[in-house]
Amino acid sequence: MRIYLIGYMASGKSNLGRQLAEKLGFSFIDLDYVFEERFRISVLDFFEKYDEAGFRKIEQSLLHETTTFNNVVISTGGGTPCYFDNMHLIKKSGISLYLHWTIPTLVERLKHVKRKRPLLKDIPAEELQDKVTKHLTEREFYYNQADYTIDMDNLDWEALLGWIRNRLVAS
């Protein structure tokens, strides 16, 4: 079984993914970290040195590699489902969970993240909500194709874990 976590930047895909994998006894893969380890460059530095299009091609290739793994939770990048055939591949290869937050909560989370996001690094704090609103509106078409949407603003961790064990892992 492959569980793909999708959602906007700072939605908690990496943190929830690590915890979920540990609780289920699965492996955990974070596509951004795989990229950085393999190519020895941060996503931010890659965007600055090369471009987003080059990153998206590599990201697609890394996503395709995940289809060969079993019993794994995969944290995708915020844009991963939005390019090429990625969302189709995710849905064909496993179960997808969209980690949904309200925009004000996402903006607050983004203000406090340690890791800089390439697409938001030059956005002043007072313009962040408008940028996130516009960007999320564009991406939600893809995110909403997920098999399940998780309301992260009202997350009950134990209920989510029980639901995943009963509904997804048992089937």
Image (cartoon, grey):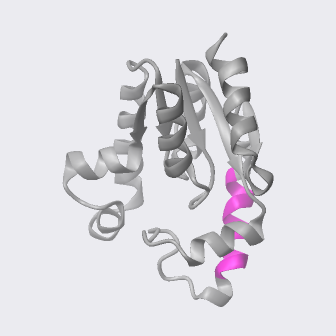
Task: Check the image and report above or below for 139 versus 106.
Answer: above
Task: Check the image and report above or below for 143 versus 154.
Answer: above
The residue sitting at the top extreme is 171
The residue sitting at the left extreme is 40
Residue at 67% across, 73% down: 107
**Which x, y percent locates residue 12?**
58, 54
* The quadrant where residue 124 appears: bottom right
**Which x, y percent locates residue 130?**
72, 77
In the image, the segment drawn in magenta is 128-139
Residue at 40% across, 43% down: 31
**Magenta highlight: main SS:** helix
- Residue 85 in sight from this viewpoint: no
Residue at 67% across, 52% down: 139
Asked whether, in this view, residue 40 is left or right of residue 108, the answer is left
**Which x, y percent locates residue 30?**
41, 44
Tell which of 16 and 125 is nearer to you.
16
**Which x, y percent locates residue 144?**
75, 41
User: Which quarter of the rendering shows the C terminus?
Assistant: top right
Task: Check the image and report above or below for 41 versus 76.
Answer: below
Q: Is residue 72 magenta?
A: no
**What is the number of callouts on the image?**
0
* The quadrant where residue 97 appears: top right
- Residue 29 in sight from this viewpoint: yes
Asked whether, in this view, residue 85 is left or right of residue 167, the answer is left
Asked whether, in this view, residue 30 is left or right of residue 80, the answer is left
Tell which of 91 and 105 is nearer to you.
105
